Image (cartoon, rainbow, N blue to C red):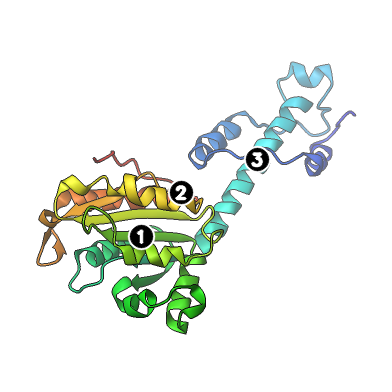
Amino acid sequence: MEIRSFTEYQKTLTTVPTPCPLLPGQLFAHQQSINKTVRQPAHGTSLTTPDARKHGTWELGTALADALSLTLLAEQLFEKELIMSRTLKVVALSGGTYRPSRTLVLTQAVLAELAQQLPIESHLIELGDIARPLGSALSRAELGAEVEAELQAIENADLLIVAAPVYRGSYPGLLKHLFDLIDLNALIDTPVLLAATGGSERHALVLDHQLRPLFSFFQALTLPIGVYATEADFANYQITSEPLKARIRLAADRATALFGVHAKPLLKIA
């Protein structure tokens, strides 16, 4: 088919199939390259004649390729706009059972950092608040309405933050009991940001050796960057360690990238 006008060319765009998506970071550079190469032919010029090729204007193949790129760019920007306009349900679970709690302080710090980068509706669950009715239930059918509502909040979250203190070399048994009552399929593909607190750095591997396998069972998407804090990172139950603050920013930054927000060029911090 010979296309004799720019209007006829535009009509062909409706038949162009949807391409595979680009990474968000490629969009701006891709748009710039399109702007440099796309040129509209002179009025009445055929896009497939030798004369058109001679004058370096449109050829059908190039025109369709550019159309694909423009369609792709519009789709990507539209998807990002949808994500940014929707409030994300972020549920944070602090696995400590006492107050004051360094685990709770760490959980709140991660939530606050996420709130600066994403439109979120946060819900904080303190294990200590539901410890007794949770611990007395042998099955989910025995749970009261308050605890059942908290379990449903976990199951319906867009993003989970799970923070646990280290007791006797592991996370608390009551925290495990809570997840024993979670539906087996409820957390599939749910992003989970892991955090933990311990008396010393010797317990730092609790994130990878204890918590990560738990959520792998649920087929959840545990984020690669977790946050571990020791007693030395706090003073009067406030975070005073600059490396810990930087780690929290890094973890939040990596989490936001999952929701279409361009990640900041932060360095990895061990």
Camera-nearest label, 2 or 1: 2
Q: Which element is circle 1 on?
A: strand
On screen, 49 above or below 236?
A: above
Q: Amino acid at mark 3?
A: Leu
Location of residue 36 (image quadrant): top right
Q: How far apart are labels 3 and 2 at the CA level?
A: 39 Å
Residue count near mark 1 (Cα–Cα under 10 Å), binned few <14, some 14–19, many ≥20: many
C-alpha gap between disc 3 and disc 1: 41 Å
Where on the picture, by quarter, is residue 104? bottom left
Of marks 3 and 1, which one's residue comes earlier in the chain? Answer: 3
Q: Nearer the viewer, residue 15 or 92?
A: 92
Q: Amino acid at mark 2?
A: Ser
Query: Which tag is nearer the camera, tag 3 or tag 1?
Result: 1
Q: Quadrant location of the N terminus?
A: top right
- Which residue is tagged 3? 70
- Looking at the rendered structure, the secondary structure element under dot 3 is helix
Q: Position of residue 224 (x, y in %)?
A: 38, 44
How far from the left and from the top, in percent, is residue 151?
46, 71
Using the image as rendered, state which of residue 156 and residue 200 is in the foreground: 200
Q: Please, which residue is most extreme toward the bottom here?
A: 145
Indicate the position of residue 257 as horizontal and vertical percent values: 44, 48
**Is residue 91 something one can see in this rendering?**
no
Residue 111 is drawn in which quadrant? bottom left
Q: Give the residue at mark 2.
A: 216
Give the residue furthest to the front.
138
Whether 4 is drawn above or below 13: the answer is above
- Disc 2 is placed on an element classified as helix
